[in-house]
Image (cartoon, helix red, strand yellow):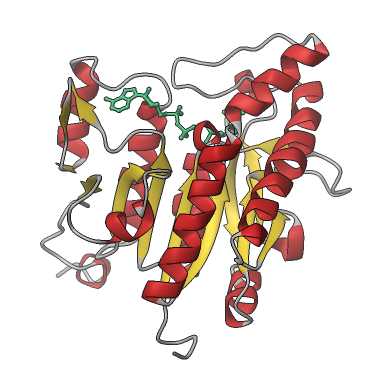
Amino acid sequence: MSAEKRRRVVLKIGGSVLDDPATRVRFAANVAQGMTELDLDVVIIHGGGAQLTRHQERLGLEVKRNDRGLRITDPETALAAVQVLGGEVNAALVSALAKASVRSIGLTCADANLASARVLDPALGAVGEIVAVDASVLEDLAAARFVPVIATVAPDEADALGTSFLNVNADAAVAPIAGAWGADAVLFLSDVASVLDGDQPVLTLDAAGAARLEARGVLKGGMIPKVEAALSAAAALPGTLVKIASGNATQALVAALGSGAGTSFIAPNPIVTASEVAHGS
Ligand SMILES: Nc1ncnc2c1ncn2[C@@H]1O[C@H](COP(=O)(O)OP(=O)(O)O)[C@@H](O)[C@H]1O
Ligand SMILES: CC(=O)N[C@@H](CCC(=O)OP(=O)(O)O)C(=O)O
């Protein structure tokens, strides 16, 4: 099938799945199966929060997060993020994919100007939000049948020397990158099969439903920014399949791209188009 016809899938895989060699291998097998059976172009965006925490502890750095799960990132931690996310975690994932016969290439957001970031909130230190994405490297790699594997450490747009990197939450990086590439599906793959309300899977969520779950204290820890990121991706890519689903269950990727697995996110459904709003009609 030609590159124009293949469906574009962005996978966000969390550090929780990647931390264990066995689940990492299962994730790689799922990617291989999805690409072979469904003829997909795949871009992977990965986390590595658990691994970065361990490295901070080895260095004797204090581990601090704000109430929405974002790591307060001092300059030493920002350097550790480049080393751990852009180094250890990225290389291990690329290697696991290679063993599953998936030809992948590891990137940070600096590679081929993929993306830059600005400081999100000075109180958090070197934490970034993505401000510009040039998806041409993703187009080029996918056309050559490579899978880009992206670590979300991004050059600070305010630093002309290109030496400062900002630590971007991997869930939050998904909507801007998937939007720029024009993804047909966006899957946030984690170590849970879906968002859960008690022990019940939540099949669909919109912004109002997510706010109700958060108010009831059902969403905790890393699930809060993940749900927020999934809602942003659904809003940025109307008509795109956006899900939180399992990354390591057997055949998880093919299952998540079908109708029966995970939590689907529904964008607000505008009754007027953007151009109608612009023309004041
Ligand atoms: N309502 C919920 N439903 C499912 N998981 C939840 C919920 N609230 C909190 N969690 C936790 O969120 C975790 C996933 O978030 P996180 O560890 O940040 O994932 P990742 O490393 O995959 O990005 C799950 O392992 C689970 O413990
Ligand atoms: C600013 C911020 O919090 N960045 C994250 C980046 C890694 C990440 O997002 O990892 P997971 O997907 O495994 O949670 C962090 O430092 O933990």
* Picture layout, residue 185 above or below residue 67: below
Q: Quadrant of residue 7?
A: bottom left
> How far across and how far down the image is residue 91, in percent?
73, 48
> How far across and how far down the image is residue 144, in percent?
64, 81
Q: Quadrant of residue 158?
A: top right
Q: Which residue is found at the position 65% from the left and 12% from the top?
A: 63
Which residue extends farthest bottom?
2
Horizontally, is 278 left or right of 52 in the view?
Answer: left
Q: Quadrant of residue 56?
A: top right
* Image quarter in which the C terminus is found: bottom left
- Residue 121 can be seen in this image: no
> How far across and how far down the image is residue 253, in percent?
37, 56
Q: Which residue is found at the position 21% from the left and 32% from the top?
A: 210
* Image quarter in which the N terminus is found: bottom left
Horizontally, is 10 left or right of 63 in the view?
Answer: left
Which is nearer the eye, 242 or 237?
242
Regarding ligand 2, which quadrant of the image does it lie in? Answer: top right
> How far across and how far down the image is residue 66, in percent?
51, 16
- Residue 82 can be seen in this image: yes
Which residue extends farthest left?
271
Q: Which residue is found at the position 41% from the left and 66% from the top?
A: 34
Q: Count numbered badges in the picture.
A: 0
Horizontally, is 260 left or right of 253 in the view?
Answer: left
